[in-house]
Amino acid sequence: MIPNGIRAKWAADEPVLNGWLAMACPFTAEIMAAQGYDSLTIDLQHGLVGYEAATTMLQAMRTSPVTPLVRVPWLDPAAIMKTLDAGAYGVICPMINTSEEAARLVSYVRYPPAGVRSFGPIRANFSAGADYGQHADREVLCLAMIETAEAMANLDAIVATPGLDGVYIGPADLTLGLTGRRYPTGFDREEPEMVEAIRTILAKAHGAGIRACLHNGTPAYAARAIGWGFDLVTISNDVRLLAGAAQASVAATRKLIGEMPAGPDRTAAGPDSKAAGPDSKAAGGY
């Protein structure tokens, strides 16, 4: 079986830079996979992605050495097992609130006797290797999301769950869970009580000998989280990156247009100009 690149980074005591895919597009996944991320997560919970599209995205990502993860919609054995059979090297599961739920999550990710995962790695046998069944329990990652007040109350028990590789903090839901609507929603929390909560989860995870991961909105906050000791940081997602790049491009162009001096050059390519009209060969002859 091809080794899990995230585990290799952690074994070398290096942080993992994770990207996020919310659009159901293999081409987007292929492009993102080529940008230097250590791992990429396909979002089946809040992303616009279904199982079939996710499978084609996993195939597209295989052109690069990036490690593929999937956030499943919920603590559902069918979704978790099918995701792994399709070739994901790890599962991020939302809304894990108790040690019992964490134990169920682990059981869905591991084969017997460690768990109850049914054997049928229809694509993983090809994408990961024909010996997948022998090594999957050791290579596949199981990450539980901590994002509610109930999870915080049960944190010690959750992080002590046998077989759990780490916890993944969803700061937006965690803020809603701990403070209600007192603060605006979002990822990069600056409120002292939220920073304390995030760092408490980090400390509890490391104290239990497992990894801590954090979802971020900006590179600056991700770097800050690595400085705190986080093992994996997610940097934005494909939707925000596309929107941000498009917005910056439009804004820059409008600024340049506004700075251009008035004169004949401003109208030379206007709608009535033959120089750039629809019949112009210079314009491509469309």
Image (cartoon, rainbow, N blue to C red):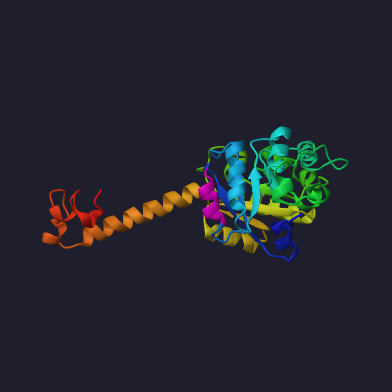
Quadrant location of residue 267? bottom left
Looking at this view, name the residue that lies furthest to the bottom: 12
Q: How many marks?
A: 0
Q: Pick out the residue farthest to the right.
A: 113
| Nearer the observer, 19 or 175 | 19
The answer to which image quadrant residue 77 occupies is top right
Residue sitting nearer the eye, 160 or 91 = 91
Position of residue 262 relative to residue 285, above or below, is below
Magenta-highlighted residues: 25-33
Is 21 magenta? The answer is: no
Residue drawn at point x = 67 percent, y = 61 percent: 229
Outermost residue, left direction?
A: 264
**Residue 184, position as x, y percentages in the image:** 50, 43
Q: Position of residue 179 (x, y in %)?
A: 59, 40
Asked if residue 57 lies left or right of residue 100, the reply is: left
Up the image or down, 74 lies above or below 37; here it is: above
Magenta stretch holds residue 30 = yes
The answer to whether residue 142 shows anywhere in this view is no
Q: Residue at x 65, y 51 (%)?
A: 68
Q: Does residue 220 appear in the picture of this structure?
A: yes
Q: What x and y, as percent, mark residue 242?
A: 45, 50
Q: Is residue 184 left or right of residue 160?
A: left
Q: Quadrant of the N terminus?
A: bottom right
Q: In the rendering, at what x and y percent does residue 20 appear?
A: 57, 49
Main secondary structure of the magenta stretch: helix
Residue closer to the observer: 102 or 141: 141
